[in-house]
Amino acid sequence: MNERNAELKFETRVVHECILPEDWDGATLPPICQSASHRHRSAESLSDTFAGKQKEHIYMRLTNPTNSVLEKKLAALENGRGAVFMSSGMAAITNTCMALLRAGDEFVASRSLFMSTYLLFKRVFAKYDIRCQLVDPLDLAAMEAAITDRTRFLYLETITNPGMEVPNLRAAADLAHRHGLPLVVDSTLATPWLCRPLEHGADVVIHSTTKYLSGHGNAVGGVVIDGGTFDWLGSDRFPDFAPFVERKGELALLDKIWREHHINFGTTAAPLHAYLTMIGLDTLALRMERHMANTLEVARYLQSHPKVNWIRYPGLPDHPSHATAQELFKGKGYGGLLAFGLKDQETCFRFINSLKLVYHLANLGDCKTLVIHPASSQYISFPDQEREEIGISSDLLRLSVGIEDVDDIIADLEQALASL
Ligand SMILES: Cc1ncc(COP(=O)(O)O)c(C=O)c1O
């Protein structure tokens, strides 16, 4: 971030940050640099680049000029020190965790996790002798009790999906640091417009940029942003970080993620996705404002409807996370996602099939309003008991509220509920 931008408001920075037309013949967006590799004029130049003595691009799997602009922009917006953009949110989560973990290690995570994150943590990592302890994200005592001498990090989501819980990030960060652990936060549902976890003590932030950051359902991507705050060698849990600290100092984790995992697992994002994400980012603040306002209004409407049995949204005063969300999000809003319950699965299906405006699909954070019945779709392969235990009941519908006129969204919900 340059000095001029540091004085600007987020709404201005999200448009202008790291966009430097003078570097690109006056173009107001960086070009899509669609080249698999980059020519070096001398043998010394390529050798020096591989040796890390100079920063040049080599090969698209490693870095790409378009992606680099988005990385700088996202790091600046989260007030982080550096970022790596990857092929998906799951790539960012997998690479970050793999860089932090070794066989035999443990970590502590919220039990309310995005479905693929849950499967990665509980099923995939178990194959490599890595144990994930799942706890209630609102229960700090349970979090602390789950920490052992093998624990390497704490992992939370700013707003859980679809539990809609909002953990106290500052308290979780203090707890993690007392035990010499970093706090990693998936902040996909909040975006840096609503909350910047690094400012609340987190050490690493992850986003699926597929959602609100791109905002138009046209690009897939993920990013990991390193706050550069964690003292890896000050904690006796990270002796394997020494070479990375020596090479990159405060950005040791980002270097480990990039060097050990991202480039070898080949989780590269195509530059078109970085380009599309940058176009989406320009309107992030405006879109988020409308998402928040619409979601609160839809939540109030659903809460008062006799055919809706229950509703989960942290913007409603009776939600267990309402007070924490109010403090963390400074009254700007409570997210664009909510969950509500109808009579049973059959009723949920009839409701979905009656909708005319709302799209039925597996995504969230699009400018269009989206609905899904998680138990019969994303979670269909889960055993019934496990699905219930993690709060995916068969009467649950998840709504990602878009930026349309809220009267039209409510009218569509109204006619679908009336048909039941
Ligand atoms: C909170 C959260 N994190 C991560 C992901 C994964 O992102 P992607 O689909 O880009 O891999 C999702 C996807 O829905 C999500 O909701």
Image: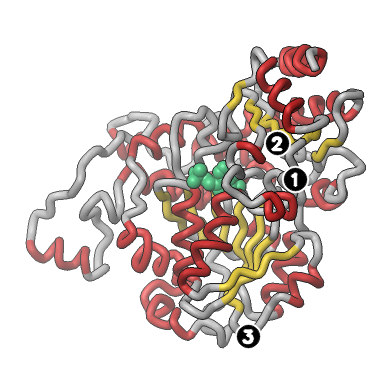
Query: What residue appears at the point 63 percent right and 85 percent down from the top-left corner?
Result: 149
> From the viewer's perspective, is residue 103 above or below residue 310?
below
x and y percentages locating residue 161 in the rendered image? 68, 45
Name the residue: 21% across, 66% down.
50
Is tag 1's residue or tag 3's residue first in the polypeptide sequence? 3
Q: Residues within 10 Å of mark 2 (few under 14, many from 20)?
A: many
User: What residue is pinned by disc 2?
Assistant: 337
User: Which residue was labeled with disc 3?
Assistant: 149
Q: Mark number for residue 164?
A: 1
Label 2 sits on what residue type?
A: Leu
Alpha carbon distance from label 1 to label 3: 31 Å
Q: Where on the image, by quarter, is ligand 1?
A: top right
Q: Nearer the viewer, residue 394 or 128?
A: 394
The residues bearing labels 3 and 2 have C-alpha atoms spaced at a distance of 37 Å
Report helix, strand or loop for mark 1. Answer: loop
Q: CA distance from mark 1 to mark 2?
A: 8 Å
Q: Which of pointers 3 and 2 lies earlier in the amino acid sequence?
A: 3
Question: Residue 291: percent from the left, percent from the top?
Answer: 69, 29
Nearer to us in this view, 275 or 187:
187
- How many labels were placed on the picture? 3
Q: Are marks 1 and 2 in contact (CB under 8 Å)?
A: yes
Left or right: 327 with respect to 234? Answer: right
